[in-house]
Image (spheres, rainbow, N blue to C red):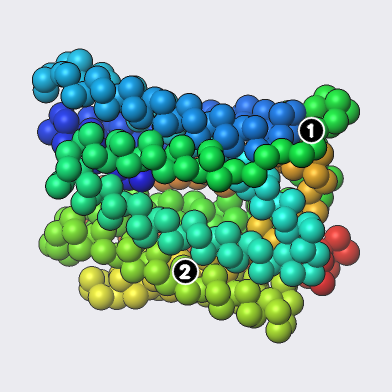
Amino acid sequence: MTTYGIPLLVLATTGSAALTGLAFALEWFPRIGAFTVAGTVVDRFGTARVFRAACVTRALAVLAAALLLSGLEAGAPATVTVMVLAAVTGFLTEFSYVAAEAAGGKASRAAGDRAHRVQSVLLAIDQSAMLAGPLVSGLLLEHGGPAAMLSTLAGFSLLAATLCPRQTTLPSGAAAKKSGLRAGWRTLRSLPALAWLIGGLVVSNCAVGLLQAAMPVIVVTELGRSSADAGMIWSVAALASLLAITAARRAIDRWGLWPAGATAAALAAAATLAVAHADTYRGYLLLIAVLMAGEGGLTVVLRTLRSHLIPSHVFGSTLAVTILLLLLPFPAAGLLVAAVPAAQLGHAITVVALLQALGLATAFTRLRTLPATPA
């Protein structure tokens, strides 16, 4: 709801597509900045404290914005309010995200050989929320106005803070001293299996980010379809990813982590190469769904490997570094789409698809031979 509902609120409040796009940026850049400190804070103060504090603060910020908007007419004050809200909620959401991921890593380590099952359940929750959140936000905003949407968002935040289990143990002083982006970077470099996988996924995200940024241009400008049709592609893709997560869990149970990951990588790379040559809406829809199914399987592998290999006392810091690396291709893809003429986007997609195939093939070739990779 935070990711998709706040920009919808900006559009409803300002009526400006440009400001709506700026709201996305105001959510995006603080989120990237949050990862530079969120991992350190989680390692020093613990997952439960950080998660609860982020949720409560987000609820207070959202309620304050709802009260301000109820007393403001459309104009500069209302615009400033929703734009500031976009930046604040984007920043706070990443603190709760890192804390939740750290808790998931702890649960995965406790599960031992069944860690991939824990991660597949967590991913299924994430994907279900990605399907439901935008729909709920849109319906509430359309039928109840900003107050209804913001109040519901605040209610979910407070409910999350209430349901968060109490923290029974505090991080040790030694762990706190070792936390930080520098410690996370050192840890990542000391884990070659994880480092190679992250490297391959960074290259893969260049392709995924370019497709996400270019798809509205391709569907609306090149194919002459509506913006709703462009959105439908990613809704179908999210559903395909959700199904692939379940399939990945069963594949890892039966064949192991490496074969399941290599299959998902091959699926994603092949779909991206095919997308570069698609020329119909149905072709784009089906191929993007296949691509995101492969990405769903790769994400299960990443999160399982991450939970197995990263030491618990620097998990938050190392997690923040890995997420930061994986997110950097997305704003770069947006800049590339802005610089490349629409008619040349197909060639750009072909280039990044070839790089994606090469990067994933190299990563999984190395993963097969590294002794640190779990069976």
**Location of residue 201 with respect to 300 vertically, above or below:** above
- Depth check: give the residue in front, 208 or 301: 301
Q: Which quadrant holds residue 15?
A: top left
Q: Quadrant of the N terminus?
A: top left
Amino acid type shown at disc 2: Leu
Q: Is residue 29 at all visible to an observer of this figure?
A: no
- Give the image location of residue 331, x and y in percent: 43, 39
| Horizontal side, residue 283 vs residue 257: left or right | left
Mark found first going from the N terminus, 1 or 2: 1
What residue did someone put label 2 on?
Answer: 242
| Horizontal side, residue 212 vs residue 321: left or right | left
Q: Which quadrant holds residue 131?
A: bottom left
Task: Please report contact status of discs 1 and 2: CB closer than 8 Å, yes or no.
Answer: no
Write the residue at 18% across / 24% down: 70
Write the residue at 39% across / 69% down: 239
Q: Quadrant of the C terminus?
A: bottom right
The Cα atoms of the two marked residues, 1 and 2, are separated by 35 Å
Which label is found at residue 162? none
Q: Residues within 10 Å of mark 2 (few under 14, many from 20)?
A: many
